Image: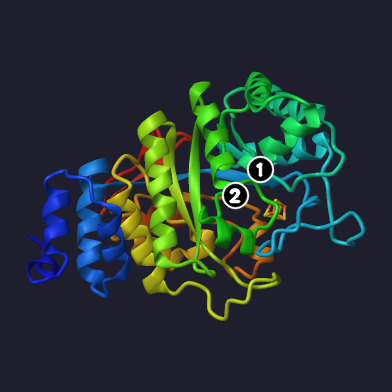
């Protein structure tokens, strides 16, 4: 048994995880409130090892934001612009295809595409975009759109959510992104993202997608004005949907960045807070295979440490990120494959290049 666990107040939860038992919401809150980060990390590391063994993954991908125009004004968002703003943008489909073509030369396997809720682009723009990208390279995996974008597109197209998802799937959509979950607790959600879809709507978009045979990821935005109990409540709802559909292939906790927005948060999440959030997520979300340490929000150094606190994935090369950087992230715009491989190897894990669904594409040499 791990040295840190033997005398820890969390020893009973270690034993529960070792026995393969599910922990309760009360125990998840206990883990969040504990100051024993070493013991928490040991429990999360045990849960990770039982789930995925001595491996950690990354993906070679590229982000594309097709536009930052948005009809909503979520208080926490530093990305959205109105048509009157000088730094608003929207890309034509040929421009998007050109970005994809350049990235394919770098070996990407996935495009991750999101934007604001554009006031006037027709539904056809989105299906044409997917078809044009699949025509460029059929094997390129297209992970696109948040749940609120899907609701917006359904409204635009005057279709049901299921009809909208079905058409997007036929046009080439491989996976939904997990963005936009923010925090499910209604009052906090209204305080940071007024006008956005409800938790039930977010979950139902993913439910309908999963029922169509699709897979997706999901997120939690932490470290703003929510309580630790709100985080547990958020995880509870994700775990319940995963029990129902088994359609989530990974969970991505997102550290809040406070610049250029309207939420009065003096200090963004600390390293301690990020590590405990990743660790509790790994332990509580026992029906999720993969927990991602999102280096854009954490910084690569902390993301690497998170591999010893329950995470088993470092996300991707990304190449060009706008949403977190406009909110003050001072991480680089991209990571190279070799940097991610080195970061994983240093922790004693075997690096694995994965696809959109976290399936291994290439297993690299063990450390
Ligand atoms: S978070 Fe999304 S929906 Fe909200 S304002 Fe920003 S781009 Fe628009």
Q: Which residue is mark 1?
A: 148
Please provide percent x and percent y for residue 196: 67, 50
- Mark 2 lies on a secondary structure that is loop
Q: Check disc 2 and report the residue beneath it.
A: 180
**Residue 295 pos. (x, y %):** 49, 59
Q: Which mark is residue 199?
A: none
Q: Position of residue 272 (x, y in %)?
A: 37, 73
Is residue 179 visible in the rendered image? The answer is yes
Image: 8 above or below 152: below
15 or 133: nearer the eye? 15
Asked whether mark 1 and ligand 1 are closer than 8 Å, the reply comes as: yes
Helix, strand or loop for disc 1: helix
Nearer to the camera, 144 or 25: 25
- Residue drawn where x is 82% and y is 34% of the image: 94
* Residue shown at 58% from the left, 50% from the top: 318
> How was the colour assigned to the protein in this rendering?
rainbow
Q: Residue furthest top?
A: 170
Q: Are marks 1 and 2 in contact (CB under 8 Å)?
A: yes
Task: Identify which residue is drawn at 81% across, 40% down.
Answer: 95
């Amino acid at each position: 048994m791990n040295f840190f666990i033997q005398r820890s107040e969390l020893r009973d939860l270690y034993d529960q995880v070792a026995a393969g038992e599910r922990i309760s919401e009360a125990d998840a809150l206990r883990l969040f409130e504990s100051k024993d980060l070493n013991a928490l990390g040991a429990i999360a590391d045990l849960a990770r090892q039982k789930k995925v063994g001595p491996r950690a993954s990354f993906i070679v991908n590229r982000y594309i934001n097709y536009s930052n125009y948005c009809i909503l004004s979520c208080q926490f968002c530093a990305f959205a612009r109105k048509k009157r703003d000088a730094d608003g943008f929207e890309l034509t489909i040929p421009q998007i295809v050109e970005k994809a073509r350049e990235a394919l030369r770098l070996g990407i396997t996935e495009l991750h595409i999101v934007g604001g809720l554009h006031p006037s682009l027709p539904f056809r723009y989105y299906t044409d975009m997917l078809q044009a990208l699949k025509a460029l390279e059929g094997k390129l995996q297209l992970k696109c759109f948040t749940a609120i974008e899907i609701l917006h597109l359904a409204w635009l197209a005057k279709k049901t959510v299921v009809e909208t998802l079905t058409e997007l799937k036929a046009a080439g959509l491989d996976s939904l992104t997990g963005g936009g979950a923010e925090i499910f607790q209604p009052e906090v959600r209204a305080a940071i993202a007024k006008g956005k879809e409800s938790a039930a709507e977010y979950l139902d978009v993913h439910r309908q997608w999963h029922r169509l045979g699709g897979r997706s990821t999901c997120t939690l935005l932490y470290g703003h004005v929510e309580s630790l109990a709100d985080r547990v409540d958020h995880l509870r709802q994700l775990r319940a949907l995963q029990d129902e559909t088994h359609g989530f292939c990974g969970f991505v906790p997102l550290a809040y960045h406070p610049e250029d927005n309207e939420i009065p948060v003096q200090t963004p999440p600390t390293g301690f807070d990020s590590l405990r959030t990743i660790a509790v997520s790994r332990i509580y979300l026992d029906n999720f295979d993969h927990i991602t340490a999102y280096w854009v929000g954490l910084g690569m150094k902390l993301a690497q440490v998170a591999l010893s606190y329950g995470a088993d994935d470092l996300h991707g090369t990304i190449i060009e990120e706008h949403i977190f950087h406009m909110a003050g992230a001072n991480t680089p715009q991209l990571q190279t494959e070799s940097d991610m491989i080195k970061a994983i190897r240093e922790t004693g894990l075997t690096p694995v290049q994965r696809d959109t669904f976290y399936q291994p594409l290439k297993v690299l040499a063990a450390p």
